[in-house]
Structure formats: structure tokens, C-alpha cells
Image (cartoon, grey):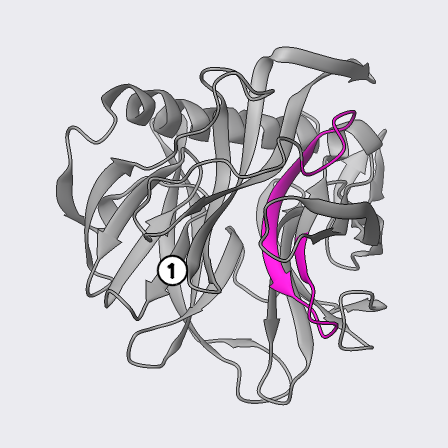
Amino acid sequence: MPRHFFRALLILFAITLVYPLSAQRGSRGVRTVPLGEIRLSDPCILADSATQTYYMTGTGGMLWKSTDLKMWTGPYNVVRHDTASWMGPRPMIWAAELHRYKGRYYYFATFTNRAVVIGTVRGNRIERRASHVLVSDRPDGPYVPMQDSIYLPADRPTLDGTFWVDTDGNPYMVFCGEWLANWNGTIEKQQLKPDLSGSVGEPKVLFRASDSPWSRERENGKETFNKVTDGPWLFRTGTGRLGMLWTSWVYDVYTQGVAYSESGTLDGPWIQEPEPVTPPNYGHSMLFKTLDGRWMMSVHSHKNVNGRYIRIPTLFEVDLSGDKLVVRP
């Protein structure tokens, strides 16, 4: 089975396991469980000093809460999207993130309306999918739309939007251009309005999947780069160096790499590290500082359970004190 179809199946499994069940039950069925019992893709954790609470979200759009990173209560339904918008009444929600900015809380997520097809590329049905931003005055929502109904171009699929304020003082969304449409996935930046209520100007490509020295797949019997770009996350090291975590594949293994910007800004150029930064089968990570001051990485892995792939959130401790990010065992 070609590499890209394998990934698509894994995404479908993750959505099947997470999205329909949580969407139907809303915040009913809330329970308290250890982190290892939660099945969640693309886990993102906000450590909120104002409430002394950790808030975790991800694919499926639901929210979990914890005070110690060990026991989590949820899931809570916190999304109140516009059902009359391009998203439709029941969009899929992928790779949701929470960010606190200027006293408010922002929900960056990928919304997919499977009922709307914007094109076909190499036999692949391209559905209406885009990264978007919602807002709330509370970390546990509800999160609602703002001014702009569209942040990114409507004629191509985008995903995995994250947040960064660059050295120019402007806020940006950094996101992926879907490999299914361009056959060489991109990571791009899009300037946002000062209150994040919409976008300014046009996106700019930062780098492409083909720039990776470590990702691999076989196509027509030949080894080549993997086409997937997935899950960007920005950070600065202790020396002030700008880095970006992002994920692709090495054949059938989900793998995470890191790149560093030579200019110290989003514009790069971005230099890819030659080797992955985490062990095999971990990806789509983010970084957060715990309430007691330690840097942690939230990431998910795949596990085959009776022929079904599940995704399990995991935490690694990281060291950012030097010139490079170091992941602890």
C-alpha cells in the first residue's frame, strides 16, 4: 500500500475513534482517567497560570482538564462554530490547539466539511478543509467565531494551523499546505490581524516536504522524500534560536523532525536537522512549560489494537537551555 494512503487510513481511524462519539455525547459522559487511558490524536496542552489548570485538546475538538498532568477529566464540548458557514453543521475537527494571547484564549483548529469537494488531484477527492481561529474569554470555552469567516484561501486544503508572534511584533498562523493537493506538502505563514480576528495579505511558503533529509517513502519502486508535512510548532531555545518541530513519515513510521531558522524569524531560511528529534512512532508534538516551570513535549504515538490503529498521548521532558532542543528519554 503506498505511504500516503496508509497515512490517510490512520487519520480516518483516528477520526472514527474520536470525533463521532464525542460529537454525539457533547459534555455528557465526563469522566476522570489517567492520561494513558485517553485516546487522542495531536494532543495540545495549555498550562494556564490564571486557573492553575492544564487544558488538553486535539483531533475531535473536545477538551480535557487536569491539575497534575496525570489524571484528566473530560471530554467537554467547547466548540460553537457557525453552522451556516463553509464548515457546515458537523465539521470534522483536527489538531486543535489552545493559545492565550493578550488576555483572551484562542482555538486554532482544522475544520473539514466533507460535503463540499473543491477538486480532484491525481484521483484524490479534495474536500473543503482549512485552519481557522475561534475565541473565548475562558480557557474552557465556549469558543466562538470572530470577524473573518475565512482565514486561508478557499480553493486549496490547509491544515494544522499554529500560532506565533514573530520579531516584527505581528501575530501569524503557521500551517501546512495539504500534500494531497500539491504533492509536496508545504509549511507556510499567514499574517493575522492584531486581535487574531482575521488574516492580512497572502500566505508565504517557508519550506516544503522535499527539504527534509530524513523523511522517506517509495514511489514507483524508487526511494524519495515523503510528501507529508504535518503539525508545525514554533519555539525558541535558551540562546534565542528559533526552531520548528514538524512531522512526516519514514516509510510507514510516523516520525518527527526539527528545523532552525538562520535569520531567527519565520522567513528563515529554514535548515533541517539531519536526524529525527524523537524516537520512531511519535509525532505531531507541541511544547509547554508546566506550572512549576519545566518544559514538556506533548506528542502522540500509534498502536495497533486488534487490527485498529489508536493514537495515545504521551509526555516527554525537554531541555531548551542550550542552542538546540533536546528530548529526554
How packed mark 1 is, by other alpha carbons closer than 10 Å (few <14, some 14-19, many 20 or more), is many
**What amino acid does circle 1 point to?**
Leu
Q: Residue at x 33, y 23 (%)?
A: 23
Q: What is the quadrant of the C terminus in the image?
A: bottom left
Front one among 176 and 329 = 176
Query: Residue 273 placed where, x, y %?
Result: 73, 69
> Does 324 appear above or below 102?
below
Q: What is the quadrant of the N terminus in the image?
A: top right
Front one among 269 and 122 = 269
Residue 157 belongs to the span the image colors magenta: yes
Q: Residue at x 15, y 36 (%)?
A: 30
Q: Residue at x 33, y 53 (%)?
A: 139
- Name the residue at the top extreme: 115
Q: Secondary structure at mark 1?
A: strand
Left or right of 209? Residue 45 is left
> Does 291 appear above or below 257?
below
Residue to which mark 1 is pinned: 46
Query: Residue 183 placed where, x, y %?
Result: 82, 33
Q: Residue at x 64, y 27 (%)?
A: 129
Q: Which residues are magenta?
A: 151-173
